[in-house]
Structure formats: structure tokens, C-alpha cells
Image: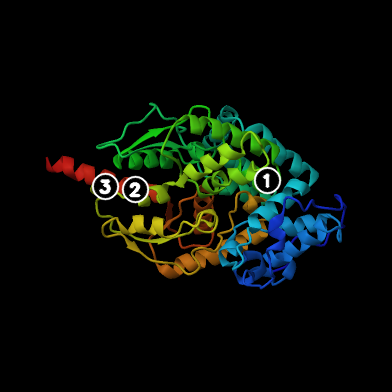
Amino acid sequence: MSEPALHKQAQPHGSKIATLDLPELYQCVHCGLCLNQCPTYRALRLETESPRGRIHLVKAAADGRIELTERFKDHLYLCLLCRACESACPSGVQYGHIAETAREILGPPGSKLARVVLNFVLTQLLPYPQRLRWAAALLRFYQQSGLPRVLRPLLPERLQKMESMLPPISQHFFSPDADPLPAIGARRAKVAMLNGCVMPLFFSEVNAATVRVLRRNGCDVVFPRNQICCGALNVHNGESEAAKKMARRNIDVFLDAGVDAIIVNAAGCGAAMKEYDHLLRNDPAYAEKAKRFSALVKDATEFLAGLGLVGRLAPLKISATYQDPCHLAHGQRVRNQPRNLLKAIPELQLKEMDGSDRCCGSAGIYNITHPGMSQHLLKEKMQSVAATQAEVVIAPNPGCILQLRYGSQQYGPGLKVYHLMDLLDRAYSEAESSSSNAV
């Protein structure tokens, strides 16, 4: 596979990265155990496209030995930030912190126009839930109007692919109609849930399913009214100011809710929220509050596995394979909990795929900014899925779901992709239905 976007003329951005905020740089012993865990190194076999190589580049820039050129920037942004290297690293190097800090200095990726568009999305859309809903409503109108059939053939090939990857916008955006939503049965916990930016618009049914599963397991569920986007996409794409503002807002509203846990059903969001303490480490007004907040954040699967499922689950006679979202397996170190929940569903057969924790190529907006590498990784992933001969794929993260659904259409096998909460909710619902019919 050819090395993408690494040979254009270098244009200096500056000469030095401040070293004071990057102590992680000096933990790396360059042992190389990260190499074959890195998707871009496996594909290209280039040292500069490995975690070790990128750390060396950032350290050289920090020491003033190389310039922050466009080529340097390309190396940093070809990384998917999957953090598989962190799971493999014997020295505990937090590579994600290095890459995100470097990107903060370099700024967003792409051409000048692409940077303007991305900056608009990061600073003028994501922090404003109502604007996001207006934009999604317009997109839903477009999808239902018949315009895609007319316009799609007229678009450039890259835009055609981007448009074809869009899922149907939910008919009804998720908005909880009561607050709090009371536990069903004995109350075991009070939790607050992140509504998110993508989830209520593209996956409203998953948010609804998550709430039902939490309530059936004895949880009062609240949605703090003034919560906003978690800021993960901002942090990953070099935009930190709006990200910090969003983090402060969420810290205030969620801590004021007085809950036992903050539940997140999107792996990327959960990983970002668990690192608010790192994002705001130099903020004297929020550093301590951010630590308290991050300690409360739990992925929905992590929380439910720890709480222990209660109630009857109906048998689901399906074979399923599980895709580890990068920011769940590597970012949050949550691996066994989702599998244990799946195994709790009677008659569901879990078939493990080879390389389940290898990135599928979604990585936030990576499948848009780096489509070649993204599709290379997706083809590999779909081959692993096919080898299991499973009927469905489970992936508790919206980006993975979208990517795998696209992969199922383009590369096969043609099978359905679900969030884990979908299956738990279905098992509970069918159990309740059978009990009602028996009465």
C-alpha cells in the first residue's frame, strides 16, 4: 500500500514543541513492541508510521532538531489514535497524550478549505445541541426527499463515498420525556447519562435501549439538561479551546446531578470524558473537579457488568462476533465486561474474531480524512468477521457501527451490526412479552 500524503512540499509551521507538558516523551525506550500493534505500521512497514517513530519525530521537534512542516503534520495525522500501542507498551507510555498535544500545536488536518470546514463543525456545531439538531433535520429531509438519487451521480467520487456512508437519520431524535426516569423494581443506583451529539440523532433507538436496560437493572436515570458534546472529536483534531469549554460545562452539570456514576454508551466519548482530568490538568479552577468527574465516568457495559444484571433475559438464538472499539479496549481497558454481558444472554453464541481489538478504520472522522488507509483496514476487519461465520456483529460504539455496516455492504459478508445495548434490551423485552402472554 502506498504511503499517502507524505511527499508534498514542506511548509514550516514553526520550529519547536514545548517539552514541559510532554513528560511521556521520555518514557519511551524504543523497544518496538508497539510496532505490530499499530495499524499504519502494519500496512506501510515504515518506521515513521509507527508509534515509536512518531514519538521520535515529536521529541526531535521538541528539541528543536526538526521543523514542524506539513510532512511532519501528515505523519501525526495518519495515526488513527487507536491506542493499541498503549496496550502493548511495557513502559506505560501514554502515546495518545503525546499525539493529541502535538496536534493541538499543529492544528486541524487537511487543506485550507478542509480546515475551515472542520473548525466550523468543531467550534460552531458540536458545542451547540440545538444547532446539531437543525443540521440533522436538514440532512433527514435530504435523505427522504429523493435528492440523493439525483445528486449522488453528480458528486465527485470521494463525496459519493462519504454520502453513501451516512446512516439514515433517526425519525425521532432522542429526548428523555421525564427526569429522572425511575428504576424498575428495587432501586440500586442513581446514574446520569450522556445524551451525546451523534447518538440522539443517528442512534436514538440505542439511547432509548440503554435507558430501558439501566432502569430494568434498578437505576434511576437522569439527563442533566445543560449537558453538551463531550469534545472528543475536538481533542483528536487539534482543537482544544472549545473542547475545554465543553468539558467544563459537562463537569459542572453532571457533578451537580449528585449521581453514583456517569454512563456513556459511546466508547470514544467515554474515553474522552475519563481524560477530562488530563485535558484540564493546568486549569486551577477545574483540575480537581475534573478528577472527581472522570472517576465517575463508566461505559454502559462496564457499569452493568459491575452492578450485575438482574431480571430474566429471553433466549436469543443467534451467533454473534464482538468488535472491540479501540477507545473501549485500549483507551478504557474494558474488554471482558461486554463479553460477559453477551454471555449472560441465553443461547447466544459468541464467536471471537481474529484481531477483534484491531481498528476497523473509523477512528472519529478518519474514514473521511484518510479514506485509503481506512478502507484498507476495513477490508481486513471484514475478512476477520467473515471467518467467524457469525450472523451479527456487536460493536458498542457509533463510529464502529457505521464503519462495519458500510463494510458489510461493500465487502461482505452482508450481516447486521448492533450495539450491545440493542441485544440486551431485546432479550429483556422478549422475556417480558413471554411473561405477559403466559398470564
User: Residue 36 location in percent, x, y?
Assistant: 61, 71
Query: What residue type is disc 2 on?
Result: Leu
> Which residue does the image show at 56% across and 37% down from the upper left?
289
For the N terminus, the quadrant is bottom right
Q: Which mark is residue 307?
A: 2
Label 2 sits on a secondary structure element that is helix
Which of 51 and 372 lies nearest the eye of the viewer? 51
- Sequence-wise, the earlier of marks 2 and 1 is 1
Which of 324 and 329 lies nearest the eye of the viewer? 329
Q: Are marks 1 and 3 in contact (CB under 8 Å)?
A: no
Q: Residues within 10 Å of mark 1 (few under 14, many from 20)?
A: few
> Which residue does the image show at 17% across and 43% down from the upper left?
435
Query: In the rendered view, does 216 fall on the left or right side of 16?
Result: left
Residue 181 versus residue 62 in the image, above or below: above
In the rendered picture of this protein, how many numbered marks are placed on residues? 3
Q: Residues within 10 Å of mark 3 (few under 14, many from 20)?
A: few
In this rendering, which labeled residue sits more in front, label 2 or label 3? 2
- Sequence-wise, the earlier of marks 1 and 3 is 1
> Which residue does the image show at 55% across and 35% down from the upper left?
251
> Which residue does the image show at 56% across and 63% down from the upper left?
87
User: Residue 431 location in percent, x, y?
Assistant: 23, 46
Label 1 sits on a secondary structure element that is loop
Query: What residue type is disc 1 on?
Result: Leu
Cα separation, mark 1 vs mark 3, equals 51 Å
Q: Which mark is residue 155?
A: 1
Q: Which residue is mark 3?
A: 310
